[in-house]
Image (cartoon, grey):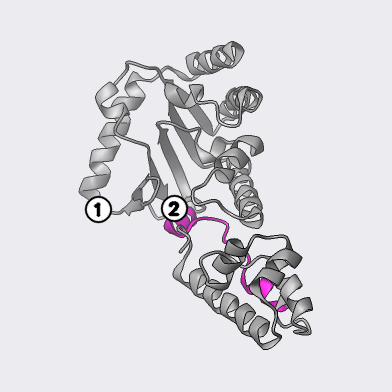
Amino acid sequence: MATGESRQTQQNWRYCGGQIKLWREEAQVTRQSLAEESGYDYEYVKSMECGRRRPTLRLLQTADQLCRAGGKLAAAHEFLKPEPFPARSQEYMALEAEAIAVHDYSLGLIPGLLQIEQYARALISESCPPLDDETVEERVRARLERQGALAHRTKVVYGFVIYEAALRTEVGGRDVMRQQLLRLPEIGGWRNVSIQVLPFGKCSGLALNGSFILLETDEHERFAYVEGPETSVLHADANRISDLVQVHGMIRMQALGVEESAAFIRKVAKEL
């Protein structure tokens, strides 16, 4: 089963895949024939029929035509649209959209709220297991839309501390990375946004423990979000949040100032 999807989404995949199989067998269409007509290989179609992958619009339309389903299979696409965010992060995204303060420490990648389209697309496209094209497009769109908050929610405080490693990891190639880096000082110039760099060798013990985000809602509730490759945790426990607030304070004290950081980022971009 594909990772990162909600249980309801996975159930929809299984149901729709099962319907494709039932219609195909009733019409005496082989899986190989469906694969050839739709332009997929046999195992990919099998994965969609078994619900391990999301049945694509192309497969639904091809199956509908071959099985003479009269639009009944193609209509299922409305219930199979990709989720804009992985299931594990959806609760956090809802809180972020209403937050009055967001403080992000990023260890190895540019924070999602600061990513340019090419950088985001390179990251999302390289997911494992691979995502289908429609899911990639939806998640890139959602990430860029999410970034609109920085420009439109001007009373919200956004603070970013980025470890130097994230600046030197060439996601998408040198040209994309250069564009990404040059975008950071631009956003950092907005009055509600601060971007700082934590150089190599500073605060090493704490800096290498991983990325996390602290946020405060308009009701002054505080949360901490820690995201990993496979799992994510949204902390509401006051003791755990307090620990991460202290860690963030230490990291921020060791980071370069805003103007120094902007100059440092431009220097790294020039070196690419």
Locate residue 167, reporting x and y percent: 50, 23
Count of numbered tags: 2
Locate residue 211 relative to residue 148 in the image: left or right: left
Which residue: 65% across, 50% down? 141
Residue type highlighted by circle 2: Asp
**Residue 23 vertical position relative to residue 121 in the rendered view, above or below:** below
Q: Main secondary structure of the magenta part?
A: helix
**Residue 135 vertical position relative to residue 154 in the rendered view, above or below:** below
Mark 2 sits on what residue? 218
Q: Which residues are magenta?
A: 75-94
**Residue 101 vertical position relative to residue 72 in the rendered view, above or below:** above
Rendered image quadrant of residue 115? top right
Locate residue 85, reporting x and y percent: 53, 55
Number of the label disc, if any, that sits on residue 237: 1
Locate residue 138, reporting x and y percent: 64, 54
Mark pair 1, 2: CA separation: 18 Å
Locate residue 65 relative to residue 156 in the image: left or right: right
